[in-house]
Amino acid sequence: MELAFKDHPIYAISGPTCSGKTALGVRLAKHVGGEVINFDSVQIYRGIQIATAKPSDDEMQGIPHHLIDYVDPNVNYTAADWAADAAQKIAEIESRGNVPVLVGGTGFYLRTLRDPLFESPKTDQALRERLRSIRDRKGPEHLHNLLLRLDPEAAAKLFPRDAPRVMRALEVIFQTGELFSRQQPNRADPPEFSKRIRLFVLEPPRELLYEKINARTEQHFANGLVDEVKQLLAEGVNEASNALGAHGYRRVCEFLRGERTLESAVERSKQDVRNYAKRQLTWFRREPDAVWLSGFGDDPAVFETIEGLHV
């Protein structure tokens, strides 16, 4: 039967890192006749493997996966780039009579797909790294306060812990010398399919989630994360790249520069990922249409909840 795609849902599975998004996304794709589109900002990079939780062939269970191992790690691949590529993949998947299932934890990617950004200057990596450093040392609220002083109108529209958007607003101000709020009206219209996206967000018990994060981080180091970073650097991947700015990779780079011990790199990576999981949950709580799922993605009861919503 031919699907009327103008009315057919597009599904999005998200949640914090380690919550089982891959397992749930694959099961849903098998249920609806779907193909998976990745919206994890690190899985997008080739050669960045150990600490990214990219799905294995076994985990994919024969379901086509798109936008994984997609770009070179030295490429400054932006949310706008991903949104354009994801929109093309959605069209391709639907042209085959299949259903797009978006799976990932980078909320900024998904929001950019549904609500396109305005045209803005390319990212200045050195500036972004300075802002990341401030965020890590002083918290995202400090960056929001800075934006509040520079552009109160823009700051009033952004949640204080919405670090990606706050940082981008600051970058635009510093790079162009113009207020971010005066540039925002130049946005493209949302794509036709944006209203068809049904968002499900996993929320497992916090204590169990943190146990999984800690164990998986230790496993990454045991599986050779330090050697992987050494190899990437030897191949010419820039330490300031988005790829090596990811959790785990950043702390290994600090270890290799002699700025912390290996034990410190492991422990700080655990803390980074736990903090990131909290930020992810905070982010998705601001999505008014999100359907929250209590549990991990491989819990049969979680999928039964989705089935009960007539998916």
Image (cartoon, helix red, strand yellow):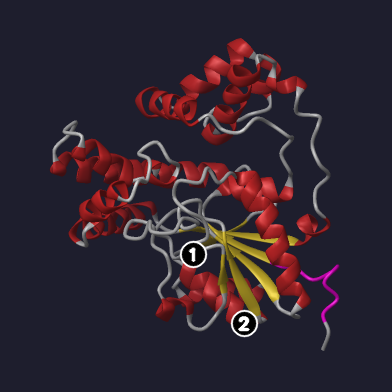
Mark 1 and mark 2: Cα distance apart in space: 15 Å
| Above or below: residue 217 compared with residue 254 | below
Which residue: 71% across, 78% down? 98
Circle 1 crowding by C-alpha within 10 Å: few under 14, some 14–19, many from 20: many
Q: Main secondary structure of the magenta part?
A: loop
Whether residue 287 is visible, yes or no, is no
The quadrant the C terminus occupies is bottom right
* Closer to the camera in the image, 170 or 28: 170
Which residue bears the numbered disc 2? 31
Is 16 left or right of 136, judged from the image as shown? right
Which residue: 55% across, 79% down? 63
Residue 17 picture location, percent across and down: 42, 55
Residue 156: which quarter of the image?
top right
The quadrant the N terminus occupies is bottom right
Highlighted magenta segment, given as a residue range: 3-10
Residue 291: which quarter of the image?
bottom right
* Residue furthest out toward the top: 149
* Closer to the camera in the image, 146 or 221: 221
* Residue furthest out toward the front: 235
Is residue 239 a member of the stretch shown in magenta?
A: no
Which residue bears the numbered disc 1? 21
Is 204 left or right of 65, judged from the image as shown? left
Residue 196 picture location, percent across and down: 77, 61
Is 298 left or right of 236, judged from the image as shown? right
| Above or below: residue 279 compared with residue 166 | below
Q: Mark 1 or 2 closer to N-term?
A: 1
Task: Specify the amino acid type for callout 2.
Answer: His
* Closer to the camera in the image, 275 or 123: 123
